[in-house]
């Protein structure tokens, strides 16, 4: 970067505040929000507030930036689009935070997490695609993309240098004057650099939409060299490797392995990246080796995507549908869409259609009745019900004795179908699935379904099993003598608990305290699920979730499990 460019930087930064005032405001709000979350320490009373502050402002900044850029080209500035977009995201973010379950084993967490990912991905893509949505070609999009990447690299470099300089100054100051401090100042500097300085520097380097529309795409020497000597050789090696593997499959007549999906995905990513970066060659009226190669590459990837499809079909036919296989299948379909879009010459704005297809498929796969979670759940529940009916059970839910008997029956089977059903049953049980509880109560003797060893035909029996869920009524009255309150989740090690005389004894040592508290709870309370508070001298636990599985023949079992999630009150 030359001296002239450096002199322009202050004016560019000030212009960023004028061009994108709302996006800058959200960037500053992000910094305040993250500092607040860091200081709050995730206390239970502020859990949902902290969660919302972690996910709302960054996406809000990207949405505000995208709306401002869309209005730049026609120069029709209006507050209404900002209000509509901001209100929609605000409502969605609040709804997702309210729905987000505290229990880490709840499948709802995965659902909300995938929804977050969809919204963030869509908001990010809209920054580059939305301003040029009505254009008849990709020229403006390509210029904007290249200049924005350059602006992002410069912003990252400057932010990193500033962060190192500030941390060095703080470190030197504290050491020279013998001041003992926590990590707080360094955390603050990292948050400010990443959440405020970097976005504002990036905003200042974003090119004008009008300038991008007027400029003609052209490759510089660095881009040309990188494409010729980096992307082309690597992509060619990937394609050659996979073609060789296709030849091996045909010769040996065997099904493809699971690794194929990763290699095909890498090839497609490199191909899409190369085709996008080489737009000037694609639109060049003079036919060259590069322009011909860019037309061949998408067609050359068709056999690779078909190979991936065969591998996916094999896995689903062998093991059935799962959330991961659903997503892989959706990605595979998306690859076919990419190839079709790239090969159809009539489609001029290829980036626009690729973005539309991607976001549409992402939305379908993560939300609604056809989402991966819903489809997989329906298939799994039906297979579990079919396994129960096959064993002669028709009255649900099963009792504890019937569950143990069901476990004994299917352990005597070793067929592939039964193994799949038991695997699904175990996963659904670990998630405390509500619909599964209509057939088999969660937390009962389901872990007995694990396969017995060939040398020991005796089935291990439970010493005790319990699952208690008070999360629907998780408000606890604070004891009068309590001086400290902390939300915690603890999975206990084997040495931290024991079951003796129909009573479970366990030890809990809070972090940052040199003291161990000894608690106990009776079998009767566990079996009746009447465990809301556990109390000992100097401490009290408000129980949100308690999950316990202990076996009689402990030495022959590897999967004893004991965990508690709740509120710890200390005197």
Image (cartoon, grey):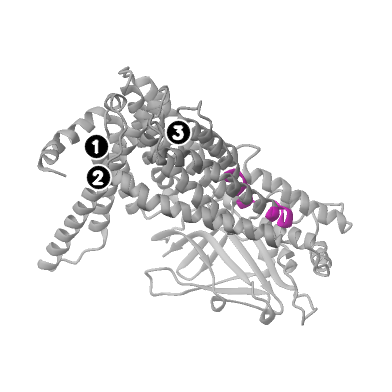
Rendered residue at 53%/45% (across/down): 114
Q: Are marks 1 and 3 in contact (CB under 8 Å)?
A: no
Magenta region includes residue 323: yes
Q: Position of residue 290 (x, y in %)?
A: 40, 41
The one nearer the camera, 141 or 235, is 235
Q: Which mark is residue 256?
A: none
Q: Earlier in the sequence, mark 2 or mark 3?
A: 2
* Crowdedness near tag 2: few (<14), some (14–19) or many (≥20) residues, C-alpha within 10 Å: many
Q: Are marks 2 and 1 in contact (CB under 8 Å)?
A: yes
Nearer to us: label 1 or label 3: 3
**Is any atom of residue 323 visible in this view?**
no
Q: Position of residue 418 (x, y in %)?
A: 79, 61
**Is any atom of residue 292 visible in this view?**
yes
For numbered disc 2, what is the local secondary structure?
helix
Q: Earlier in the sequence, mark 2 or mark 1?
A: 2
For numbered disc 3, what is the local secondary structure?
helix
Q: Magenta span: helix, strand or loop, mainly?
A: helix
| Residue at image mark 1 | 205
Q: Quadrant of the C terminus?
A: bottom left
Nearer to us: label 2 or label 3: 3
Image check: 366 left or right of 188? right
Rendered residue at 59%/37% (across/down): 364
The one nearer the camera, 426 or 404, is 426
Disc 2 versus disc 3: distance between alpha carbons?
A: 25 Å
Q: Position of residue 15 (x, y in %)?
A: 20, 30
| Residue at image mark 2 | 155
| Residue at image mark 3 | 351
| Magenta range | 314-331
Number of marks present in the image shown: 3
Magenta region includes residue 500: no
């Amino acid at each position: 970067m030359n001296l002239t460019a450096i002199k322009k930087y202050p004016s560019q930064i000030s212009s960023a505040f004028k061009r994108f005032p709302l996006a800058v405001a959200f960037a500053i709000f992000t910094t305040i929000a993250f500092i607040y979350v860091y200081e709050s320490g995730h206390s239970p009373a502020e859990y949902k507030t902290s969660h919302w502050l972690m996910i709302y402002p960054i996406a809000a900044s990207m949405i505000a930036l995208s709306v401002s850029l869309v209005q730049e080209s026609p120069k029709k500035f209006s507050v209404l689009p900002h209000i509509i977009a901001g209100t929609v995201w605000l409502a969605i973010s609040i709804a997702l935070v309210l729905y987000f379950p505290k229990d880490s084993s709840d499948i709802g967490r995965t659902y909300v997490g995938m929804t977050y990912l969809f919204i963030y991905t869509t908001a990010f893509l809209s920054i580059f695609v939305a301003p040029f949505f009505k254009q008849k070609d990709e020229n403006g999009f390509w210029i904007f993309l290249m200049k924005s990447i350059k602006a992002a690299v410069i912003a990252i470099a400057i932010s990193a240098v500033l962060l190192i300089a500030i941390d060095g100054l703080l470190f030197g100051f504290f050491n020279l004057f013998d001041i003992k401090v926590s990590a707080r100042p360094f955390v603050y500097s990292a948050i400010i650099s990443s959440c405020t300085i970097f976005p504002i520097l990036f905003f200042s380097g974003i090119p004008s939409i009008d300038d991008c529309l007027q400029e003609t795409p052209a490759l510089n020497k660095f881009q040309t060299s990188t494409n010729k000597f980096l992307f082309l050789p690597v992509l060619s090696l990937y394609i050659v490797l996979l073609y060789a593997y296709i030849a091996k499959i045909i010769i040996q007549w065997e099904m493809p392995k699971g690794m194929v999906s990763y290699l095909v995905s890498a090839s497609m990513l490199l191909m899409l990246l190369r085709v996008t970066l080489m737009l000037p060659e694609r639109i060049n009226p003079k036919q060259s080796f590069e322009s011909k190669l860019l037309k061949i590459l998408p067609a050359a990837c068709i056999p690779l995507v078909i190979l991936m499809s065969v591998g996916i079909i094999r896995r689903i036919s062998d093991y059935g549908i799962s959330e991961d296989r659903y997503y892989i299948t959706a990605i595979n379909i998306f690859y076919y869409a990419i190839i079709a879009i790239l090969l159809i010459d009539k489609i001029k704005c290829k980036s626009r259609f690729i973005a539309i297809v991607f976001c549409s498929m992402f939305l379908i796969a993560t939300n609604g009745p056809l989402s991966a979670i819903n489809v997989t759940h329906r298939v799994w529940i039906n297979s579990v019900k079919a396994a129960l009916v096959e064993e002669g059970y028709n009255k649900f839910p099963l009792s504890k004795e019937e569950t143990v008997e069901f476990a004994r029956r299917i352990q005597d089977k070793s067929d592939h179908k039964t193994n799949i059903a038991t695997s699904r049953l175990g996963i659904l049980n670990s998630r405390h699935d509500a619909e599964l509880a209509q057939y088999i109560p969660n937390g009962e003797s389901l872990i007995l379904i694990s396969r017995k060893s060939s040398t020991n035909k005796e089935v291990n029996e439970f010493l005790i099993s319990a699952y208690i869920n008070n999360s629907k009524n998780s408000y606890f009255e604070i004891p009068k003598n309590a001086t400290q309150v902390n939300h915690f989740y603890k999975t206990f090690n084997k040495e931290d608990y024991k079951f003796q005389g129909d009573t479970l004894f366990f030890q809990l040592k809070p972090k940052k305290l040199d003291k161990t508290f000894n608690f106990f709870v009776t079998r009767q309370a566990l079996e009746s699920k009447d465990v809301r508070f556990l109390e000992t001298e100097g401490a009290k636990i408000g129980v949100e979730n308690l999950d316990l599985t202990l076996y009689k023949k402990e030495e022959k079992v590897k999967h004893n499990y004991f965990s508690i999630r709740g509120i710890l009150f200390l005197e």
